[in-house]
Image (cartoon, rainbow, N blue to C red):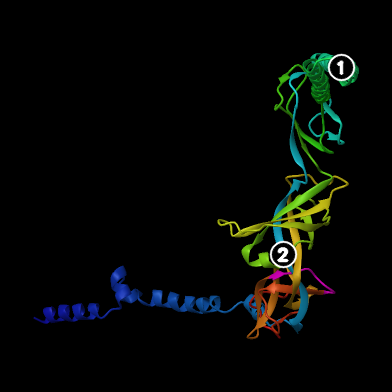
Amino acid sequence: MRKNRMDKTMQKSDWNLPAPTLAAGWPAGRVALPLALLLSLAPGCKHAAAPTGGSDAESAPVAVTLVAAREVKTPRVLTLSGSLIGAEEAQVAAGAAGKVVATYVERGSYVRKGAVLARLDARAVSAQAAKATADVESLKAQAAQAQVDCERTDRLFAKGAIAKADYDKTRTQCETSRWSVSSAEAQKTLTTEALHDTEIRAPFSGLVVERSVTAGEYVRVDSPVARLVNVDSLRVEITVPEGDVPLVRQGMLIDFRAAGDTDGRVYHGKIRYVGPSVRKQSRDAIVEAVFQNDAHDLRPGMFVTARLTVGEQSLPAVPAAAVRADGTLRHVYVAVGGRLEDRLVQAGEAQGGEVPIVSGLKAGEEVVAELTPDVRDGARVK
């Protein structure tokens, strides 16, 4: 009876042990060891959670000079894209039928107006021209004799020496001979032009874009011989958005740069043509400007970026040192609520040490006047 009570007392004391000791199957006498280990690890965990010195440095305020963006008057400039086309461009046709006996240009050749591009076999046309010339001379001689006969007939008819029928017949021959000479002269002109057309000439000065024939080929009157483009004077074809079309007028000056030009050369032209309507799909209008390309630096087909001044506008401006360039992007740091905000802006061209901001900044907002390595997004301002 006493033994059973002792067993029940022991069982009851076992359930009062901590849960980790029971789960591990440890005896009651070994409970002090894991508790000692836990107590020894606790100070180390508290030390790991302590803040580092680096976070203090990052949260430290930075000393900067702030300047308010001031409003300035600046030209309103439209930046437009387009391409170059030749002022004149033609697919030169043969103009006569025959075999090509010689060509005188290659692709890329520069030719003057009237220069011979190719020559056709002219032997048959030359013989026809010679025959036409001989026919004219022969008929002129016949017409001269007919005129003498007509004068003699007039005198005889006036004296009543010939009948009226003979007189009328002679007068008809005189008129016919004169018209025969006119017909022969017209034929001579045609053969002369045909002989001239056996030399295919450039209709204007320019570059040969493509040559379509070679010696030995037979061409017809409408066969293409060469494609020629005038590069002395080029046209800049640009597209203007619908909202800006009313601002563009004939005679306005335009500046542009070639997309592939790394030297930054600026060319100048004058608007000659403004499209009369807006295209339905793209909602823009075509505008053309012309400029002289005497040095032949630019070629038709090149892409260009054009700038067109269409008036004035008021924009916020900041010092040039306040703008950071990141490729084609521009950034400024604005003080907002005691912290710096990295803001992406669209900037214009610097003028007198200041940069006008087209979008992304309002007049009166304070920006960092001079950027240093400490200036960063989210930094507190001292």
Residue that label 1 marks: 146
Q: In whole angstroms, how far apart are the C-alphas of marks 2 and 1?
A: 71 Å
Q: Amino acid at mark 2?
A: Val
Q: Tell me: residue 5, above or below residue 148.
A: below
Quadrant holding the C terminus: bottom right
Residue that label 2 marks: 248
Q: Amino acid at mark 1?
A: Ala
Dot 1 surroundings within 10 Å: few (below 14), some, or many (20 or more)?
A: many
Frontmost residue, 252 versus 35: 252
Q: Does dot 1 land on a helix, a strand or a loop?
A: helix
Q: Residue 162: x and y, percent?
A: 84, 14
Dot 2 surroundings within 10 Å: few (below 14), some, or many (20 or more)?
A: some
Q: Residue 176: x and y, percent?
A: 79, 20
Residue 115: which quarter of the image?
A: top right
Q: Residue 191: x and y, percent?
A: 81, 21
Q: Name the mark on residue 244.
A: none
Q: Tell me: residue 72, above or below residue 251.
A: below
Whether the magenta-drawn stretch holds residue 347 is answered as yes
Residue at horizontal 77 percent and vertical 16 percent from the top:
165
Helix, strand or loop for the magenta stretch, by majority: loop
Please state the extent of the stretch shown in magenta in the rendering. 346-353
Q: Does dot 2 land on a helix, a strand or a loop?
A: loop
Q: Is residue 64 visible?
A: no
Position of 253 with respect to 25 (left or right) is right
Residue extending furthest toward the front: 160
Pointer 2 or 1: first along the chain: 1
Whether the magenta-drawn stretch holds residue 151 is answered as no
Position of 44 with respect to 158 (left or right) is left
